[in-house]
Each structure stands twice: as structure tokens, then as C-alpha cells.
Image (cartoon, helix red, strand yellow):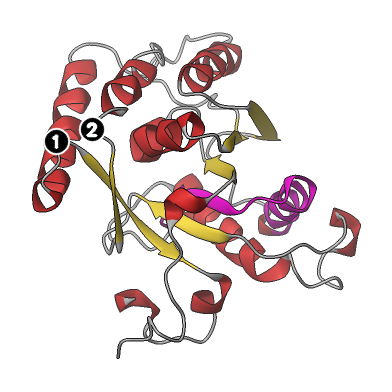
Amino acid sequence: MDLSQILPIPNLLDAKRVLAFSPHPDDNEVGAGATLAKLASSGAEVTWVVASDGSVGTEDDRAEGLAQIRQTEQEAAARSLGAHAVRWLGFTDTHLRDDPGALEFAVVAIMRELRPTAVFCPDPWLPYEAHPDHRALGHAVSTAILMVNFPLAHPDAGPAVQAPYIAYYGTAWPNTTIDVSETFQAKLDALMMHKSQFLPPLDQKIQMYLTLKAMSLGEPLGVARAEAFKVLTNHHLHFNVDTWQS
């Protein structure tokens, strides 16, 4: 069933205030860095919202001060892509699922404070996504989309606001593809600022994968590079059996 006439998909590039929710430092860059840079360059106010401290993201069991290193890397990478600000929710890496209520409250509170037009986050329904932080944050942001405009939901999180629409990155069912030919190199450059995460040979491998993926997404549009998203409204996110194919 085609519900587009009843529930049209918003134009992602029309967003004027954007919150990009990231489970860890670097996820926004991987999933949506070039699109966020494009939005920022067109005048949108784009804020990174990083849920965890990234303190577990290393294979070195002797690593010290990793959370501070990752915060410094994230601040620099976000600035390079035109971020207005970086906000930290303060949860511990790999523990976002420990208290779903606290995570949802934090997400609702920052949405009500900053009143975004659109939000980005990982798609929690990505098949084979094994990282609990990606699933937990994706679910929390999705639920918050339903709750922000209900004044009796989380009343301590601030006054109700109009629900933003959501753009899932890392999705298996995209409905929106953005030409990012002009900002794609900035995405790769920002990603490489996360030096603690992308050591050789991973640094080259991930750049190659992301480039090939962007080329394949751009080819149907006749452009050099593209990123893809599942863009939905709050009305798509409750009791709608056709949303998966919207």
C-alpha cells in the first residue's frame, strides 16, 4: 500500500535545526557525516548528541583516558563538518540498555530543549546489528519522537514540542538518498580524526568501503557520491504495518 499521499515523507534537506544522535563518538560521521555537513553548509543548525563516552571502544586493555581522547576527537571532527555544538548525554559505553527509561528521558529532554526539525540516529531495526548501544539509542530516539509532543509524557523533561521527523542512518530500507558529492571527502577527513578508532589497516578499509557504498548509492541518481536514509514522521512510528515499505 502506498501511503505517501496520506503520510508524505519529509524532505530531509528542508531541516533548519538538526539533532544527530550518536551512540558513540564517530557513529554520526560513519552513517551521515556528509549529509550533516551539507545541511550545516546550507545554514541548518546541526548539533551532535553523543550518548556514551566511548570508553570501551578499544582492543587495548591497558588503554587509559580513552573517554577524554574520544571526546577530543569527536569535538574536532564535528567542528570540521560544521556542527553548531556537541552535547554529551553522559552514559557509559556499552551500557545504554541498562536503564532504558533514563535514556529515553535524556533524549526527550534535549529534543524539548533544542526543538529540532529533524533528528538522525542509527536504525535499531537493521538486520544483524549486534551492538546493544546502537539498538538501545535507536529505540530511545524513536520512542522519544512519539512522546515529545505529549505534555503528560515525561513532564519533568520540559514543555511539549512538535515532533521532529527522523532520519535513520545505517538502514536496510532507505527511502531517501542525498547527493553528497561535494561533502563526501569532508566526511572521510572527519572520520580519520577519530585516530583512536581507525588504526591501520582499518582506516583504509573503512574509507574504501564507505566510498564504494557512496558511489553505488549515487549511481542511480547520476551523481558521484550519495548517502541513504529511512526518513519517517512520528505518524509512521506507531501502529502502521506499512511503514517498513514507506
Q: Which residues are magenta?
A: 101-123
Point 9% across, 46% down: residue: 219
Dot 2 crowding, Cα within 10 Å, few <14, some 14–19, many 20+: some
**For the residue labelled by badge 2, is the local secondary structure a helix, a strand or a loop?**
loop
**Residue 8 quadrant:** bottom left
Is residue 132 part of the magenta span, yes or no?
no
Q: Are marks 2 and 1 in contact (CB under 8 Å)?
A: yes
Point 57% across, 12% down: residue: 72
* Total numbered labels: 2
Point out residue 38 in the picture as x, y percentages from the top left corner: 41, 34
Q: Is residue 51 left or right of residue 236?
A: right
Which part of the image, by quadrant, shows the N terminus?
A: bottom left
Q: Amino acid at mark 1?
A: Ala
Point out residue 149 in the picture as x, y percentages from the top left corner: 75, 69
**172 or 149: nearer the viewer:** 149
The correct choice, above or below, for 84 with respect to 235 in the image is above
Point 38% across, 86% down: residue: 3
The correct choice, above or below, for 7 with respect to 120 in the image is below
Point out residue 93 in the picture as x, y percentages from the top left corner: 56, 34
Dot 1 crowding, Cα within 10 Å, few <14, some 14–19, many 20+: some
**244 or 214: nearer the viewer:** 214
The disc at residue 181 is: 2
Is residue 109 part of the magenta span, yes or no?
yes
Q: CA distance from mark 2 to mark 1?
A: 5 Å
Point 56% across, 38% down: residue: 44
Mark yes or no: residue 27 visible.
no
Mark yes or no: residue 217 visible.
yes
The correct choice, above or below, for 144 with respect to 67 in the image is below
The correct choice, above or below, for 19 with respect to 87 in the image is below
Location of mark 1 (residue): 224
